[in-house]
Image (spheres, rainbow, N blue to C red):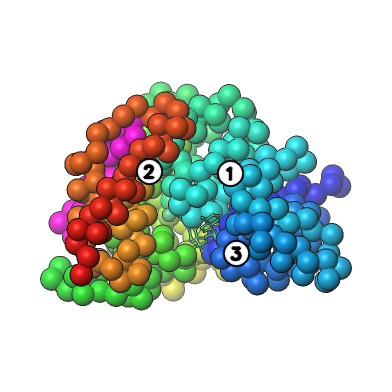
Amino acid sequence: MSSPQLITVLGATGSIGLSTLDVVARHPQRYQVYALSGYSRLAELKTLCLRHCPRYAVVPDERSAQRLQDELRAAGLATEVLAGETGLCAVASAAEVDAVMAAIVGAAGLKPTLAAVQAGKKVLLANKEALVMSGALFMQAVRESGAVLLPIDSEHNAIFQCLPSDYSRGLQVTGVRRILLTASGGPFRETPLAALAAVSPEQACAHPNWSMGRKISVDSASMMNKGLELIEACWLFDARPEQVEVVIHPQSVIHSLVDYVDGSVLAQLGNPDMRTPIAHALAWPERIDSGVAPLDLFAVGRLDFTPPDIQRFPCLRLARQAAEAGGTAPAMLNAANEVAVSAFLERRIRFPEIASIIDEVLNLETVADAATLDCILQADARARCAAEGWLKHHDR
Ligand code: NAD
Ligand code: MG
């Protein structure tokens, strides 16, 4: 038996990070944890270090690094604690690392994820915001470094499983007509439109089918998550925005579909549990046990499909607009959304104002070429500034 693969988990304390460690721990002969990162729940990170004995842990700053280092030493662990973005990039690109789970939420994950890609790692991509912001640059880095990019987002993992193995030759030449991206519709799929102004962060985070971090839960409620996923699909599978159709499927059993020119439609099904795409990507092209229960089709009973309601979900329209505009538009969309979602979670704005802020920022800011990381980060900063401006102007 060959030696275990060394895995870095960026964002280990989050929902995806914990699910990843759950799968990894089921296969100690195959996988060993090389590094874990955490940002706010550092007591939890310490517990994870005690359980998985990584060579490195990464925390946001030097002070918390020193504290965790002392605690881990006292517990008899040899783990070395690093700090900040430099630490994240180091454990994402270290020569010994075989695979990197990119599961930091938001733009904060961009540089470490890119570092893993540039180092030619097997990159398990959960951090969709990184790809949305820097798509062209990111995919070029994948091609140049020979990194193996595997999607963790359940929809993209499903699409990857349903596409022909040579899809990188082009969707059209390999007979693909459309990608059908499924969406649950979130907790507000049937809420009366007039009631949306009064919904709370708790209601927005109570997703009917998936248990996830707070930011992606709000994105699912506004369907910005599906908008970001549309952009993500375009980059991952070299699709044009019009080749990706969003389908509301409230049961979240079909994770997405691929429609071929001969009329065949392939779908991937499973229980809504992120350990399935995580295990798929970790072991690809092999298959391993993920701990997920077998799908009980008789318990599911029926599968429903409807088109999305753009009136109800303006974020979907805004994301499609940004996908079509290209350049720095997706980075600006993402940045404005991150600011707006934080403000909503802090109860500074109402739910429908998330879309209003993004709309205004996209109208105010001009789209530039997204050729370099600098251009992208500048667009991100300008959009954040414009969104903050909106918040100041509307402060209650
Ligand atoms: P989460 O909020 O549960 O976890 C986020 C992780 O990122 C935590 O470990 C946190 O410590 C870390 N983090 C937060 N801010 C940071 C910063 N500024 N610098 C460094 N680290 C930081 O989120 P999640 O639900 O696990 O989602 C993680 C990513 O995976 C997101 O991009 C999300 O869109 C994507 N994703 C999640 C799911 C899901 O089911 N949870 C599904 C598909 C895609
Ligand atoms: Mg998804």
Task: Name the spot of residue 361 as percent of width and height, x first.
Answer: 24, 46
Ligand 1 lies under 8 Å from the Cβ of mark 3: yes
Alpha carbon distance from label 1 to label 3: 16 Å
Q: Main secondary structure of the magenta part?
A: helix
Q: Looking at the rendering, which quadrant does residue 37 occupy?
A: bottom right
Within 10 Å of the Cα at label 3, are there few (<14), some (14-19), or many (20+) other Cα atoms?
A: many
Q: What's under tag 3, amino acid-wise?
A: Thr
Viewer-nearest residue: 93 or 347: 347
Question: Would you say residue 67 is visible in this rendering?
Answer: yes
Segment colored magenta:
310-329
What element does badge 3 sit on? loop
- Residue 263 in picture, x, y percent from top left: 33, 38
Asked if residue 232 lies in the magenta stretch, the reply is no
Q: Mark 2: which amino acid?
A: Ala
Residue 367 placed where, x, y %? Answer: 27, 32
Task: Label 2, secondary structure: give it.
Answer: helix
Image point (40%, 31%), residue name:
375
Q: Is mark 1 within 8 Å of ligand 1?
A: yes
Vertical order, 225 against 43 (above or below): above
Residue that badge 3 annotates: 13
- Look at the numbered discs 1 and 2 and tell me whether their residues touch, using CB distance below 8 Å: no
Mark 1 belongs to which amino acid? Pro
